Image (cartoon, rainbow, N blue to C red):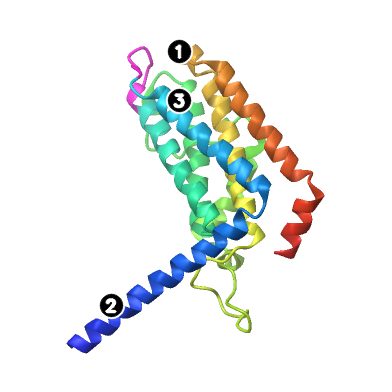
């Protein structure tokens, strides 16, 4: 490759990355134009952070299958932050793919609660029927997204700029799908909180349930306020 070609390639890469960050900045403004989105985003993020610091340094020696429990929880918490960021930045396909995995992680935590012999679960796909809320109904459609098994999945990439709407965008664009992904991520987090609230009874690890219940109630209230706000619905239709 000649020096001129190398310089052009570097320029094109920098140009693309700069454009991408510019579009992400626009999506964030549009995403948080809804005060409901900001309220729910902050509640989920704070809940994840509280659990990270609340469980940090705790001993799991009283819990069976401790290593598996700790690994699953840590994976869930780390990934949930990524899902929030991807929804905010309108990277819907990537966020949906990770959210599908989150559903599986919580399902496996539920399964782990019920078994004594770990070999019953290892090398088997988690059974989403183990979940306690209707969140399991999301799993099928999110699997279609993760596997690209239907062509309409790529509608989630959004369209090109004005005059080029028939093109698929290589940059993130805000659409109501970003809010839908985010709302689903919040509902999945409610399922996780349902699992957490009884953690002490199963493992002997002290859990301050009133904090968990408080986070759950606040998040449900914020989601209900968003769902029943006619202005929010009108705004989404205009997007």
Residue 136: x and y, percent? 61, 39
Left or right relative to 237: residue 211: left
The structure residue drawn at horizontal position 65% and vertical position 30%, both measured from the top left corner, is 218
User: In the image, which residues are magenta?
Assistant: 58-67
- The answer to which of marks 1 and 2 sits earlier in the sequence is 2
Seen in the picture, residue 143 relative to 43 is either above or below; the reply is: below
- Residue at numbered disc 1: 206
- The answer to which of marks 3 and 2 sits earlier in the sequence is 2
- The answer to which of marks 1 and 3 sits earlier in the sequence is 3
Q: Disc 1 to disc 2, how far (Cα)?
A: 54 Å
Q: Can you tell which of label 1 and label 3 is closer to the viewer?
A: 1
The structure residue drawn at horizontal position 46% and vertical position 43%, both measured from the top left corner, is 81
Q: Secondary structure at mark 2?
A: helix
Q: Are marks 1 and 3 in contact (CB under 8 Å)?
A: no
- Residue at numbered disc 3: 112
- Residue at numbered disc 2: 10
Seen in the picture, residue 78 relative to 114 is either above or below; the reply is: below
Q: Can you tell which of label 1 and label 2 is closer to the viewer?
A: 2
């Amino acid at each position: 490759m000649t020096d001129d070609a190398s310089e052009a390639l570097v320029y094109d890469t920098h140009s693309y990355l700069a454009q991408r960050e510019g579009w992400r900045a626009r999506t964030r403004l549009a995403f948080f134009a809804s005060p409901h989105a900001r309220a729910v985003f902050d509640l989920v993020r704070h809940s994840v952070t509280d659990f990270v610091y609340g469980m940090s340094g705790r001993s799991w020696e009283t819990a069976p299958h401790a290593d598996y429990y700790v690994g699953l929880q840590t994976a869930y918490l780390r990934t949930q932050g990524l899902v929030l960021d991807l929804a905010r930045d309108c990277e819907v396909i990537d966020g949906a793919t990770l959210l599908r995995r989150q559903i599986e992680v919580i399902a496996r935590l539920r399964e782990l609660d019920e078994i004594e012999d770990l070999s019953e679960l290892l090398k088997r796909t988690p059974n989403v029927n183990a979940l306690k809320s209707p969140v399991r109904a999301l799993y099928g459609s999110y699997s279609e997204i993760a596997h690209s098994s239907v062509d309409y999945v790529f509608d989630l990439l959004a369209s090109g700029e004005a005059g080029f709407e028939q093109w698929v965008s290589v940059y993130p664009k805000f659409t109501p799908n970003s809010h839908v992904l985010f709302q689903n991520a919040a509902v999945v987090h409610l399922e996780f909180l349902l699992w957490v609230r009884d953690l002490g009874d199963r493992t002997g690890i002290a859990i301050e349930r009133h904090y968990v219940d408080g986070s759950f109630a606040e998040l449900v209230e914020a989601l209900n306020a968003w769902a029943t706000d006619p202005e929010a619905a009108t705004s989404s239709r205009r997007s």
